[in-house]
Amino acid sequence: MGKKKDKKGKRQAQAESPVSDSASKSVTTAEPRPKMSSKEFEQEMEKLQVELVKMQEWVRATGAKVCVLFEGRDTAGKGGVIRLRARDEDPRKIWKLTPMDLRSYSRWYDYSRARDAMFAATDTPETPWYVVDANDKRRARLNCIAHLLSQVPYEEVPRKPVKFPKRQAKGDYVDPDYPYRMVPAIY
């Protein structure tokens, strides 16, 4: 993720990557992978969020400009079609579908041709397009963030430790006798 300069000034990857080996490898298989547990997803996401903050601090400190464009199609792929139809048939899941949404659903391959033409015209080494397999939403999010982090040569910016001043003494402060409206303690 973050990069360090070695003694010769060359960039090298940090010895310990915050991304697990399974998350950092690009794997395309015909077989669906087992569903990622919430616990595993949260553990990996926490590591990536730490790295995103490091990248953010580097951008702020260096004035670097990072532009990321996400383009996607709603109800993308076979899974999206299944979800769309399941929601249509389930009275508990009601969503607003505009006439444009319904027309776009019927024009899937027109949009596919437009996407293909856009890639052919604009995918260059300087401005590459990357496609994320989003059939597994958890893995898609992790893979997308890990890939983004791997494309930006950020470095961890040293930070000064925060030193809080001593809190003032209570002195003559008295808690008011006010009927506060308390948020219910549900959790």
Image (cartoon, rainbow, N blue to C red):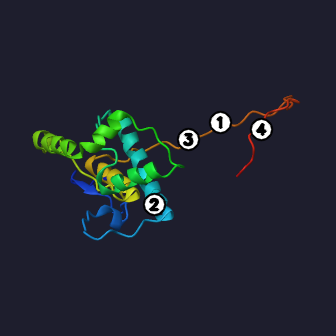
User: Disc 2 on helix, strand or loop?
Assistant: helix
115 relative to 173, above or below:
below
Q: For the N terminus, which image quadrant?
A: bottom left
- Residue type indicated by callout 4: Met
How far across and down, in percent of the image, does residue 132 sit?
A: 28, 53
Residue 84 or 40: which is nearer the viewer? 84
Question: Real-space Cα distance between discs 2 and 4?
Answer: 34 Å
- Who's the residue at 32% across and 50% down the image? 149
Q: Secondary structure at mark 1?
A: loop
Instruction: Name the amino acid type tagged 3.
Output: Val
Q: Earlier in the sequence, mark 1 or mark 2?
A: 2
User: How many C-alpha atoms fall within 10 Å of the one at disc 3: few (<14), some, or many (≥20)?
Assistant: few
Which x, y percent locates residue 80? 35, 52
- The CA distance from mark 1 to mark 3 is 10 Å
Mark sitting earlier along the chain (2/4): 2
Q: In the visual, does 16 lie left or right of 165?
A: left
Residue 151 placement, left or right of 87: left
Q: Which residue is mark 4?
A: 182
Q: Which residue is mark 1?
A: 165
Q: Which residue is mark 3?
A: 162
